[in-house]
Amino acid sequence: MQRMLIVSNRLPVTISKRKDKLNFVQSSGGLVTGLGSFYKSYDSFWIGWPGIITNEPEDKRNIKSRLKAENMYPVFLTQSDVEKYYEGFCNKTIWPLFHYFVQYTHYDESLWDAYQHVNRLFCKEVVKYAKQDDIIWIHDYHLMLLPALIREKNPDAPIGFFLHIPFPSFEIFRSLPWRIEILNGLLGSDIVGFHTLDYERHFLSSIYHLLGLESDLGQIVTKDRIINIDAFPMGIDYNKFFKANQRKNIQKEIKKIKNEVKGKRVILSIDRLDYSKGIPQRLEAFSIFLEKYPEYREKVTLILVAVPSRTNVEYYKILKQWVDELVGRINGKYGGIDWTPILYFYRSLPFSKLLAVYNISDVALVTPIRDGMNLIAKEYVASKADGKGVLILSETAGAARMLGHVLLINPNNPEEIAKTLKEALEVPEEEQIKNNREMQNQLQHYDIIWWVKGFINRLNYTKKLQNTMSAKILKVKTKRKLINEYKNSNRRLLLLDYDGTLTPFAKTPQKANPDNELFELLLKLASDKKNEIVLISGRDKETLQKWFGALNISLVAEHGAWYLEKDGTWDMLQPLAQDWKEKIYNIMELFVDRTPGTFIETKDYSLVWHYRNAEKQLGNKRVRELAEDLSYFTSNTELQVLEGNKIIEVKNSGINKGSGALRWISKDVWDFIIAIGDDWTDEDIFKVLPEKAYSIKVGTGSSVAKFNLNSPYEVRLMLKEFQGGRKK
């Protein structure tokens, strides 16, 4: 079993010192809650800040010794680090920006410097303790530079990163001055994980707009690696919550709280005191609820638990005052001697009290303005062993994407929340039980272990994919063998794609004319009487004739529909119908009108819709719609709908580059065959090659080709070496 190194800003324990004695207590927070139960059951250790600031060598030695026994290793921070890195850049820049509170975001170069410094400190400790092949799993927004820093020190390390807060839309993220550095830091990972597909999509959008990197089903290909971007909704330790109320200490707490609420129905609100949680808005909603539905006065009690958070930050001090005033106002307006509408607790709750309030609550009010996942929502549902209870959940919480039987609300609409509170209190018990049982089954299946295994399996898959791609790169030794076989052979067949293989893709097909260097290279290869050069392209025959007609080579146009043998005339591989083109053209034309930057290319026996110049998100949306429409209209016909590099093409089925290549493969007895291509259309060529033939895919990605080269530039260098040419 691989060992795992978990890296986060905080360790699972927080250390303090009182009267010369070190005190160790469990840390709070969703990450510790989620991973805490898993961590000790796996071969893993944890690196992070222990929460104490000390310059005493003796204290540091004692802390290291105590933590090592628990498979933990500390990163010691100074007071300046904590103020500028944690309280500063993390919580005054990244936290508000990523939660869409742009008005609270600070951009300060000194805070950014501190963030870089602490990420380097973490890197130093990780490199010190990590062994070869250890899985390094980095967590959250505090350490977004760390993956790339570790990658510089250990290029082959399996590195995963998981962001536990939202990743904002590109329009929000682009305002960060250090956005490029953050993205490059994250792309040091082999896999980057998010709670929801929305956050994944926002990240990929930023990668595209800021770094120019495109993705294919969440997979990004850089110069040297494949990186997977994916969504992994975090689960909880389900049984820990579902079975907890069987404990005697929790039963005792339940009785105690029931005595305090005196038979009232209970609405529960529990959160860290953070502006992203929407606590003032839900208090305003509770006030409206009591005003609009007076029949519920003296019959319900709101238990409000606000866990202190970042108490030194000014915004949080203001928020605390705001909440205090709202609670006082509501209790003063509606309360009396025998009834206090809101029971307010400004503190964290031990596990026994937490489970007790989960258990006795009729309604949980979880209404963050923006939240990565929100495990409280899941814990509440899981704790309902009797199945009774209703969850009101913000539609902007990540958990809203997983929990199907909740009452969703807009957290900025107090009137809607008030109305939903009444609805929640009136849901029949039978319906509550049915809904909660279904959600509990889901939570039990998609628990914390499922989350961890899913992430690690995806990381291992990515490393295998990288290794496979690396193994297929045409290494110097293999390349030398290939060139020697070429030079020692008498009958050679070279099957060459054009766009993306011999020349980079151009923005428009009309701007991809062959340059002088390529023309001279093909001329030299064609002048060798031992060579048969076949250029197999998706382009129309007129273009190929114009560009390459003067060369002594054979041409295949429109993916195999037309062919031209050297010194011959154009002919068809087989007769093809064209009566379908008008209908398909009209469909494509509608999408051109709806998608600026797109156009239709008309070939003799195919139609191509190009969207390379369209705005990326709109283009990706339209291509899915067009593919669906075309698939419907071409069903039960002899037509194919094919997707390529920023195109969608309709052509007669049974015609492809493979059928074109077979014409030449079967013409003679060749003692050397090589095929080079870059996209899905060239896979048909690779599939029909004899076993001893060489097949090369340009670029990375899945392919049946035996080898890979990185770019058209490398293809040209190799073809030059066929003729003894060298890099200038």
Image (cartoon, grey):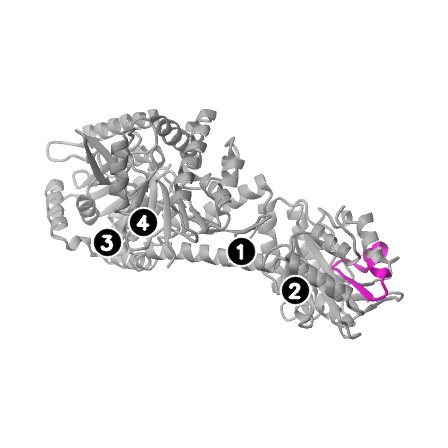
Which amino acid, by three-letter code, is at mark 2?
Glu
Foreground tag (4 vs 1):
1
Compare marks 1 and 2 and give the one earlier in the sequence. 1
**How many C-alpha atoms fall within 10 Å of the one at disc 4: few (<14), some, or many (≥20)?**
many
Query: Compared to 504, does 489 lie above or below?
Result: below
Marks 4 and 3 sit apart, C-alpha to C-alpha, by 13 Å
Question: Taking 323 as reference, is 255 left or right?
Answer: left
Region in magenta? 525-547
Compare marks 4 and 1 and give the one earlier in the sequence. 4
Instruction: Quadrant for the N terminus, please.
Output: bottom left
Residue 407 location (% of width, % of height): 33, 48
Q: In the drawing, what numbered circle is on residue 35?
A: 4
Which amino acid, by three-letter code, is at mark 3?
Lys
Write the residue at 13% across / 31% down: 336
Which amino acid, by three-letter code, is at mark 1?
Gln
Compare marks 2 and 3 and give the one earlier in the sequence. 3
